[in-house]
Image: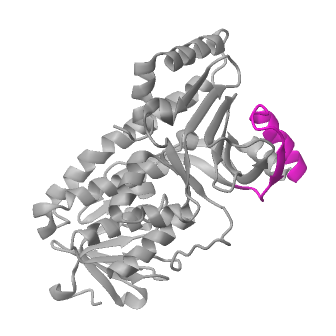
């Protein structure tokens, strides 16, 4: 496709075939827009033999969006697992709170999904829909024009042109950098240690989370009965944890989860990722818009990162309805998208920082006071329902 000549100009070009980029491309294509998707890696694939690696939780709003895109059934057939309970408790006080799907009158609180599975089902649906796909393709330069953006490959070879380009290319977004959009960063000097573990007791279709000092441990239930764990720790502690052998890691994990699921009987290899919150000052520059991790990253303590990214995707797709289809990259469209999402994402970042600070502080009497507050919320049904509806995307 030429990078010059209006007859070849796409309505929308998405850079990045992660879940957010794939969802935006598919949503726009469903509305009849001419869409392309460029991915520097290969086409996403997934099979029954694919090992469990990166796992996320989807709330009800995210799954409803994926259902509208037509991929929910395919995702559920690829090891997505609905969970009906969530238990959160304080390692230094009596506070605990539990959410239950039956109590809230919903079929599930959320789903654990594998990033690889979600990316693969979106890619397959994009192929079936006739979206122009460029796997193993990397842009090297671009020109911004009043009516379009032109992207080029090596040696300035024309690659693609579009009236709107969406940067869904990750937290270190090259497109965001190229467009000169500044980012505020907060380094937590911590890492999230991840693994897949087998437990003596069943996970009870429940997500378990415990706050202990400056650590947060979450067990996410998987379809095969195992759990995916995310253990947030200060960097020096994470280094020590990663150095443990399997037996030592299992024993340490049993202690930090308070033996809630009995013995940890097996573990996969461990991996880790740095915990850094980021927020772009603007969500668009010219005809380039940011979405997902390119626009914001968040502390993983509430598992909201992918949900916020899919909320970006949903908002942008909805803004491309009606008159906006004539020019998806118009300033009015992108300003409206920014209004839709930037304040909500900023609120969630502040809320997660607040939770982290509240649970990480152990001044005299605070654990008891914190426990009292958590118990009151657990017993105050209207407040608890409101909190749950916000957290699980039920608003």
Residue in view at x 84 percent, y 41 percent: 263
The coloring applied to the image is one colour
Residue in view at x 35 percent, y 55 percent: 65
**In this rendering, does residue 358 appear at all?**
yes
Q: Is residue 257 above or below residue 270?
A: above
345 left or right of 317 in image: right
The residue sitting at the top extreme is 365
The quarter of the picture where the C terminus appears is top left
Q: Is residue 230 above or below residue 137?
A: above
46 left or right of 214 in image: left
Question: Where's residue 151, x and y in %?
Answer: 33, 80
Question: Where's residue 189, x and y in %?
Answer: 64, 42
The quarter of the picture where the N terminus appears is bottom left
Numbered disc total: 0
Residue 321 belongs to the span the image colors magenta: no
Residue in view at x 73 percent, y 43 percent: 202
Q: Is residue 165 above or below residue 367?
A: below
Q: Is residue 129 above or below residue 251?
A: below
Question: Where's residue 330, x and y in %?
Answer: 16, 63
Query: Which image quadrant is residue 138 in?
Result: bottom left
61 left or right of 200 in image: left
**In this rendering, does residue 179 appear at all?**
no
Give the magenta part as a residue range: 245-271
Residue 254 belongs to the span the image colors magenta: yes
Question: Where's residue 284, x and y in %?
Answer: 28, 57
145 left or right of 156 in image: left
Q: Nearer the viewer, residue 55 or 192?
A: 55
Q: Nearer the viewer, residue 120 or 107?
A: 107
């Amino acid at each position: 496709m030429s990078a010059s000549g209006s007859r070849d100009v796409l309505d929308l070009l998405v850079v990045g075939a992660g879940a957010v980029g794939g969802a935006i491309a598919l949503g726009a294509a469903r509305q009849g827009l001419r869409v392309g998707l460029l991915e520097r890696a290969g086409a996403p694939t997934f099979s029954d033999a694919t090992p469990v690696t990166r796992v996320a939780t989807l709330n009800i709003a995210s799954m409803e969006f994926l259902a509208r895109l037509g991929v929910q059934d395919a995702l559920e057939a690829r090891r997505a697992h609905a969970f009906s309970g969530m238990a959160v408790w304080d390692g230094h006080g009596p506070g605990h709170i539990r959410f239950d799907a039956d109590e809230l009158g919903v079929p599930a609180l959320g789903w654990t999904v594998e990033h690889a599975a979600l990316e693969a089902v979106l890619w397959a649906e994009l192929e079936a829909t006739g979206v122009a796909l460029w796997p193993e393709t990397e842009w090297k330069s671009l020109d911004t024009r009043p009516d379009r953006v032109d992207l080029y490959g090596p040696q300035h070879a024309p690659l693609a042109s579009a009236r709107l380009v969406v940067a869904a290319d990750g937290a270190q977004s090259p497109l965001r950098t190229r467009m000169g959009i500044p980012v505020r960063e907060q380094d937590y000097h911590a890492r999230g240690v991840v693994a897949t573990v087998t437990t003596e007791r069943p996970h009870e279709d429940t997500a378990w989370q415990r706050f202990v000092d400056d650590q947060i441990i979450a067990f996410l239930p998987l379809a095969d009965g195992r759990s995916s764990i995310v253990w947030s720790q200060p960097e020096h502690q994470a280094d020590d944890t990663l150095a443990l052998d399997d037996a030592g890691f299992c024993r340490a994990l049993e202690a930090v989860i308070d033996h809630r699921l009995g013995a940890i009987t097996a573990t996969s290899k461990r991996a880790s990722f740095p915990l850094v919150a980021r927020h772009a000052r603007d969500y668009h520059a010219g005809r380039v818009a940011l979405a997902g991790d390119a626009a914001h990253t968040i502390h993983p303590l509430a598992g909201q990162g992918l949900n916020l990214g899919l909320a970006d995707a949903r908002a942008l797709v909805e803004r491309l309805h009606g008159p906006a289809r004539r020019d998806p990259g118009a300033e009015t469209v992108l300003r409206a998208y920014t209004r839709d999402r930037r304040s909500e994402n900023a609120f969630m970042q502040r809320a997660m920082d607040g939770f982290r600070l509240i649970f990480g502080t152990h001044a005299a009497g605070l654990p008891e006071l914190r426990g009292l507050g958590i118990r009151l919320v657990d017993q105050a049904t209207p407040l608890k329902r409101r909190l749950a509806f916000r957290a699980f995307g039920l608003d």
